[in-house]
Amino acid sequence: LAATGAPIIAFELKHVSQRWTRGHPPSMRKLAEDVVLALQRHGFSQAALLAHSFGTAVASVLMQTHPGVVRHVVMLDPICFNMYMPRLLRNFIYRRIGAAAASAAVHADMAATTANATTSGGASQLQQLPPPRVPGPDSGSAGSSSGLLGIVTAMLRGIAGVTLDLLMLGPARELHCTSLLCRRVVWSEINLWEHMVPEHCTVVLSGELTSHDGYRCSDGR
């Protein structure tokens, strides 16, 4: 960005930076107003926005309240297009330790049971499969196959699940993040519907996603 020679104003959202911050967390509308004030202070009436993750929430509110300020917007891994989806909010705000490991074990049980049924009796037996076993505190193998390989697989799956939970719970349960997300954010105001998307808009998705029809999407496609 610096190589373009264009002036750059970088905003730090202090209440999601995992450090001690004075004062109450601002609302999303206040953050959007701060962007407008900063642009005016530096003598700019318009700007090209570059926002990532939670920053796209601020960009969304800015585009809704001050559409004339945004000349172009680039959103990296935006959260503002699916705020109505309960899984997103539940995973980030209400997730508990062990949730990922338990989910992985259930999927492993389903896959193993399906494979066994297909091998032994054909696809017709799939309708009579027992429900997947949800691992409890006394589950030694976490739904994996018996024997040493099953124990090792279960241990690796459990470590991976707890690691994922800790990575999620670290930022989500930090004092300022919790205060901002649970007290100052109105999720319905953040969601950017199709008719609100500006003409000059670029959306970049990283990683791998699954669309509603089940197809795999990767590399931003």
Image (cartoon, grey):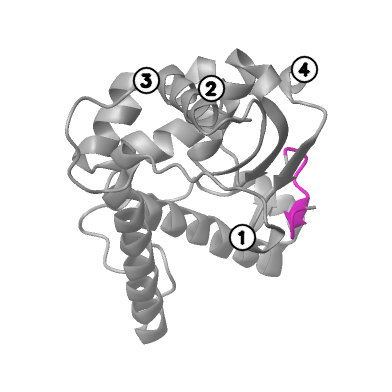
Residue that protrudes farthest toward the front in the picture: 43
**Residue at mark 2:** 190
Tell me, yes or no, whether the two marked residues, 3 and 1, touch with CB atoms within 8 Å.
Answer: no
Spot occupied by residue 111 in the image (x, y as percentages of width and height): 58, 61
| Nearest the eye: 155 or 125 | 155
Q: Magenta region, mostly helix, strand or loop?
A: loop
Relative depth, front residue between 166 and 200: 200
C-alpha separation, residue under disc 1 versus residue under disc 2:
29 Å
Q: What's the residue type where badge 4 is placed?
A: His
Tell me the kind of residue under disc 2. Answer: Ile
Q: Residues within 10 Å of mark 4 (few under 14, many from 20)?
A: few
- Identify the disc placed on residue 2: 1
Decide which of tag 2 and tag 3 comes sooner along the chain.
3
Picture residue at 78% right of the left edge, 40% below the top: 213
Question: Which residue is identified by label 4?
Answer: 195
Determine if residue 191 is in view: no
| Disc 1 versus disc 4: nearer the observer | 1
Element at label 1: helix
Q: Which residue is mark 3?
A: 27
Give the amino acid type for the residue marked by disc 3 in the picture.
Answer: Ser
Across the whole image, how many numbered discs are drawn on residues?
A: 4
* Mark 3 or mark 4, earlier in chain: 3
Q: Label 1 sits on what residue type? A: Ala
Q: Tell whether 88 sits left or right of 129.
A: left
Q: Is residue 200 above or below residue 144?
A: above
Q: Which residues are magenta?
A: 212-220
